[in-house]
Amino acid sequence: MDNFVFDLPTKIVFGKGEFSKLGKEASLLGKKALLITGRHYAKSSGLLDKAEKLLKENGVEFIEFCKVEPNPESDTVNEGGRLARENNVDFLIGLGGGSVIDATKGISVVAATGRDIWDFCEKPPKAKVPEKTLPILAVITVAATGSEADSGGVITNSKTRSKRAVFGRALFPKTSIVDPLLTLSVPQKQTIDGVIDMITHIFESYLSSHASAPVSDRVSEALIKEAMKQGEVVFNDLKNIEARESLSWISTLALSGFPSAGRRGPFPMHRMEHPISGVYGIAHGRGLAALMPAFLYHTKDIHADRLKTFGKNVLSTDSPTKAIERIVHWMKKVNAFVSLKELGVKYEDLEKLADMAIEDDGNAENEYINAREPLSKEKLMEIYKTAYNYKDLFRKA
């Protein structure tokens, strides 16, 4: 195993109906908050009204910033940061999905430093996230990104369309409320996109690392297996609260550091997906779904031993090829098997996407991204081209 420090400074308030504790938890962090939401859902669902009421009942002042878009943009984050500074808020409340929580983390950095968020996202960054930023209270409404229990946020550059992550220990939310009831209204497609995202978070480290970490392997396998099972349940029954509970907890655990303890590994599928959602505005989970089969197929040799173990323990096969086929079969059952072409990606943009993925990984000079073994631009192009139009590949899976 790799040596590790497991440090999760976030207080997780989990369970049905725990949203009712928003006002109490907020009052423990400060007296005046910037309440950050997306553009539509919080208002149209009535969730924003409920949040306002809970905050008022607990004597917490707030200013609203309801402008966060999917794949949150740097201009939006900078605007939110300026608003927080101008109004001298004590802390931030992010109320929404992963995009809202990621934006909240970026806003915290801008509010603390007065600098453009992209200064912290460049490769290498122009500035370091300070040790202290505005405290964050996260209320997650979608089981997907796991941003409620990690120290990073992904931001899209409003001008270049590049996506980058900003990291810093101060960006762990102080408190995260994870109420599965809030996920009941998430539509089928977005729910499954979230399941793909949480599975990929766990699967990438599992595949990429060379470290022997059997305990973390068993934890990861169990979480992925349960995510697949409960994803299928909720695909067929969107109001199944038991499945929603399981998925909410798996999402939170996925990026908490717990499933990957003892084996560090890169995230090549995420690196390859970031340009897709950055340029085209595609949902992150759906972009990952389009890439995963092609990625597994073209990296089967370097991941053969891991796929064999995963297949044996999760999919009842010790064949790497059959393991991939069974993953695809499950994706088809939940309507997640899709090509880049179907998502509107242009074939002539594939090389640009490969270049952006390499730049995102910080290896533009040598033209590769980190994986279990470095993946060259040529290999990336093979993956993108297969994902563009799957044709006969996996058709019989």
Image (cartoon, rainbow, N blue to C red):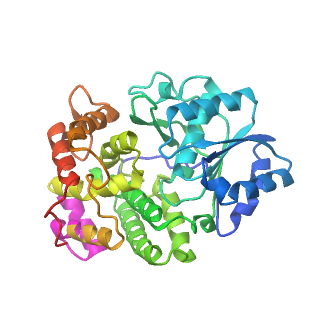
Q: Is residue 63 above or below residue 25?
A: above
Q: Nearer the viewer, residue 281 or 356?
A: 281
Tell me the residue at 76%/30% (across/down).
Answer: 88
Q: Is residue 17 left or right of residue 207?
A: right
- Closer to the camera, 133 or 107? 107
Location of residue 374 with respect to 128 vertically, above or below: below
Observer able to see residue 105: yes
Q: Quadrant of the C terminus?
A: bottom left
Q: Is residue 26 above or below residue 34?
A: below
Residue 174, given in percent of the width and then of the height, sits at: 65, 46
Residue at 56 percent across and 35 percent down: it is 76
What secondary structure is the magenta-colored segment mainly?
helix
Say if residue 369 shows up in the picture. no
| Residue 114 position in % (x across, y down) | 62, 23
**Vertically, is 170 above or below 291?**
above
Q: Where does residue 25 sit, x and y in percent of width and height?
A: 75, 53
Q: Is residue 330 left or right of residue 90?
A: left
Residue 275: name its quadrant: top left
Viewer-closest of 15 and 93: 93
Q: Position of residue 45 (x, y in %)?
A: 65, 60
Q: Which residues are magenta?
A: 304-324
State yes or no: residue 307 in magenta. Answer: yes
Q: Is residue 107 magenta?
A: no
Q: Quadrant of residue 317?
A: bottom left
Please give left or right for residue 389 compared with residue 83 in the image.
left
The number of numbered discs placed on residues in the rendered structure image is 0
247 with respect to 96 (left or right): left
